[in-house]
Amino acid sequence: MSRAGVRARLEISITDKSFRNAAGERVEILKGLALNLDVGEVGAIVGPSGCGKTTLLRIVAGLDADYTGSVHLPAHGRLGMVFQEPRLLPWRSVRDNITLAAPHASADEVAALFEMLGLAQHADHYPGELSGGLARRVALARAFAVQPDLLVLDEPFVSLDAALAARLRDELAEMVTLRPVTTLLVTHDVDEALRLADRVFLLSTRPATVLSELRIPNPRQPMGAQERADFRTRIATELERPTG
Ligand SMILES: Nc1ncnc2c1ncn2[C@@H]1O[C@H](COP(=O)(O)OP(=O)(O)OP(=O)(O)O)[C@@H](O)[C@H]1O
Ligand SMILES: [Mg+2]
């Protein structure tokens, strides 16, 4: 693995990522997977369940160094990450979970995030007192509070009701427009990918590689019904295409 050298873009090239299964056999998860994102771009990763999306994000976030290949991060100081599970500190209040991760966030900034995410009444609650959807919102607040230069989101809007998920997608779109942040987002929701991304990367089944990359002509702008339908058809066709 190599994390040397900071370039302007996010450049990922994983030659091989394997795990050992319980029987001690090597199972290939990612193989010849390459993708790049320019500064401030949002890349959405769509692929079959279990193909290695979370594994890829963990490598990008620097949580797993056991792979062959290279990851060049955009020049950055701060990483914001939302895991597939909210992963809050259970013995700390909602407010402390945010301020511990983002000690430089001002009280006003934290208050604004709580307001945006509907968390104001829950600031003094402990994670164990929260519903799954609320816990997810706290995880989002924590990722945004650090004002990240690289934002890594693993299915961030699942288990939220449809209206809240739509509102948070709008908020995310607005945030990355106001303050561009290179963002890698995993989603199973094609409309979410079309709503948020500059580029959509379609992954194959395991071992995962990039089947194709779709550029969205006017990212985060309203999309016509026909254009949306065409993208959906294209994505469904690509993902169903036999590989190997
Ligand atoms: N630490 C580990 N040790 C062994 N195998 C692992 C480990 N972590 C993940 N795997 C295996 O790697 C494969 C890919 O897992 P991963 O969680 O990256 O998939 P995913 O694409 O995120 O799936 P989903 O869409 O369900 O979230 C799975 O078969 C999983 O069982
Ligand atoms: Mg996953």
Image (spheres, grey):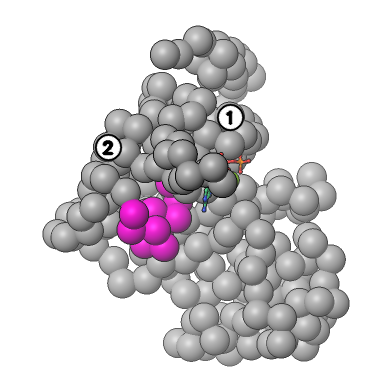
Q: Is residue 176 magenta?
A: no
Task: Tell me what residue is drawn at x 67 percent, y 50 percent.
Answer: 157
Return the x and y of residue 154 as percentages of the image width and height.
56, 51
Q: Earlier in the sequence, mark 1 or mark 2?
A: 2
* Quarter occupied by residue 131: bottom right
- Asked if residue 8 is positioned above or below residue 227 in the image, the reply reads below
Q: Secondary structure at mark 2?
A: strand
Q: Is residue 63 magenta?
A: yes
Relative to 37, is 4 on the left or the right? left
Task: Tell me what residue is drawn at x 80 percent, y 84 percent.
Answer: 125
Residue span colored magenta? 56-66
Which residue ends up furthest to the left in the rendered image? 5
Return the x and y of residue 167 as percentages of the image width and height.
70, 52
Q: In terms of image quarters, where does ligand 1 lie?
A: top right
The 10 Å Cα crowd at callout 1, few under 14, some 14 to 19, many 20 or more, is some
Task: Estimate the spatial distance between the alpha carbons at disc 1 and disc 2, rounded to whole Å.
Answer: 20 Å
- Asked if residue 184 is positioned above or below residue 87 in the image, the reply reads above
- Tag 2: amino acid: Thr
Looking at mark 1, is its residue's CB closer than 8 Å to ligand 1? Answer: yes
Q: Which residue is mark 2?
A: 15
Residue 24 shows in the view: yes
Relative to 119, is 40 on the left or the right? left
Task: Tell me what residue is drawn at x 56 percent, y 61 percent.
Answer: 82
- Asked if residue 75 is positioned above or below residue 196 in the image, the reply reads below
Q: Which residue is mark 1?
A: 48
Q: Secondary structure at mark 1?
A: loop
